[in-house]
């Protein structure tokens, strides 16, 4: 049996102490920095509704707009919201107003103005739990089902960086293609897809027979981001995961999901994007995705 290790590119030796280069190429190279904080002064707009969302229609952003639209569809009128576009490609997330409500400068961020003083929320998983508990919806109260929901919600929060920050970056955004990096993250992404496909072979939804915030968190990422944001579906042979695709299509047919997935998207095919949402009537100009 051969024990030969494939040769890898050489020529880079890490410095004893890392320091950033003067310039980085790639999609996000010009905005990434090793320090936090606001980079310019800009106040956030405030609309008429109690919930103010500042986001972009990335997979993480879609989690929240899907949840809000599902709450409204379920009759929770208090979930009416204004959704303001934060264009992360232009660096809007580094404005002083946004950093004030999310020191981590990542979308999405939500402000609940029903509370005095207003309550800022960030991290998509945290926002989902807050909304579910605030409205008593999409989070089971029975201990076993509740635990299963949290299991899968936390799984998604911990797993998505491998897909977005890992495979998505090196496959779609990096200025050069690095075989080792792409293979490393493709391997892990395939494993995660298999985890979901195996589980969904015997469960209707992630937590069992109930549609929950766990499904809303996972759906935009698996396999949504692989088809849309990163274009890796063929590379990863996503179509072979039949159980996952059955679940994905079932959720895609929900009218609230069709609405939520287009909010805060700045571009796309007709009917596929709505940069801002301030009222249910804003969807009237769209061709609802099927």
Image (spheres, grey):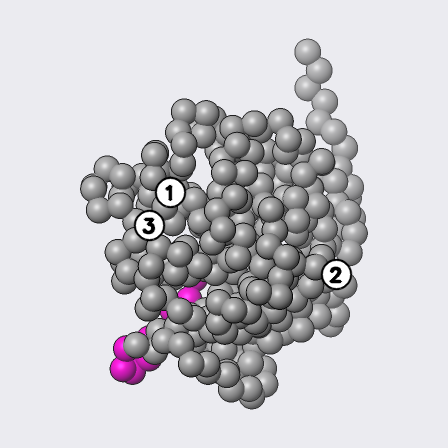
Work out how far the residue at label 2 is from the one at label 3, CA to CA, in angstroms.
39 Å
Q: Which mark is drawn over residue 211? A: 1
| Front position in the image: 138 or 271 | 271
Residue at x 63%, y 74% (from the top left corner) = 91
* Mark 2 vs mark 3: in front: 3
SS category of the residue bearing label 3: loop
x, y percent for residue 240:
62, 27
Quarter of the image with the N terminus is: top right
Q: Is residue 135 visible?
A: yes
Work out how far the residue at label 2 is from the one at label 1, CA to CA, in angstroms.
38 Å
SS category of the residue bearing label 1: loop
Query: Which comes sooner in the sequence, label 3 or label 1?
Result: 3
Query: Which comes sooner in the sequence, label 2 or label 1?
Result: 2
- Asked if 141 appears above or below 240 in the picture, the reply is below
Q: Is residue 166 visible?
A: no
Q: Is residue 120 magenta?
A: yes
x, y percent for residue 105:
51, 71
Mark 2: few/some/many CA within 10 Å (<14, 14-19, 20+): few
Mark 1: few/some/many CA within 10 Å (<14, 14-19, 20+): some
Q: Which mark is drawn over residue 26? A: 2
Please give the range of residues in magenta. 115-123
Q: Which residue lies under the disc numbered 3?
A: 138
Work out how far the residue at label 3 is from the one at label 1, CA to CA, in angstroms.
7 Å
Residue at x 28%, y 60% (from the top left corner) = 135
x, y percent for residue 30:
71, 70
Query: Which comes sooner in the sequence, label 2 or label 3?
Result: 2
Q: Are marks 3 and 1 in contact (CB under 8 Å)?
A: yes
Q: Is residue 139 left or right of residue 163?
A: left
Mark 3: few/some/many CA within 10 Å (<14, 14-19, 20+): many
């Amino acid at each position: 049996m051969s024990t030969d290790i494939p040769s890898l590119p050489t020529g880079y030796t890490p410095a004893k102490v890392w320091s950033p280069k003067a310039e980085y190429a790639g999609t996000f190279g010009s905005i990434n920095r090793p320090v936090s904080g606001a980079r310019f002064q800009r106040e956030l707009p405030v609309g008429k509704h109690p919930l103010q969302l500042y986001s972009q229609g990335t997979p993480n952003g879609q989690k929240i707009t899907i949840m809000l639209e599902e709450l409204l569809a379920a009759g929770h009128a208090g979930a009416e919201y204004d959704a303001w576009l934060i264009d992360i490609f232009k660096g809007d997330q580094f404005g002083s107003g946004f950093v004030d409500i999310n020191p981590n400068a990542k979308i999405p961020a939500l402000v609940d103005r029903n509370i005095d003083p207003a309550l800022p929320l960030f991290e998509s998983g945290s926002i989902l739990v807050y909304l579910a508990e605030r409205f008593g919806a999409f989070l089971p109260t029975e201990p076993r089902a509740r635990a299963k929901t949290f299991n899968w919600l936390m799984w998604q929060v911990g797993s998505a960086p491998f897909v977005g920050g890992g495979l998505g970056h090196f496959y779609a955004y990096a200025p050069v293609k690095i075989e080792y990096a792409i293979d490393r993250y493709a391997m892990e992404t395939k494993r995660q897809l298999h985890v979901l496909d195996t589980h969904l072979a015997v469960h209707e939804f992630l937590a069992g027979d109930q549609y929950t915030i766990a499904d809303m968190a996972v759906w935009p990422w698996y396999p949504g981001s692989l088809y849309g944001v990163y274009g890796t579906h063929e590379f990863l042979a996503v179509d072979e995961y039949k159980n996952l695709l059955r679940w994905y299509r079932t959720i895609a047919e929900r009218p609230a999901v069709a609405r939520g997935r287009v909010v805060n998207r700045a571009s796309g095919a007709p009917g596929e994007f709505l940069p801002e949402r301030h009222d249910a009537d804003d969807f009237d100009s769209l061709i609802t995705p099927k």
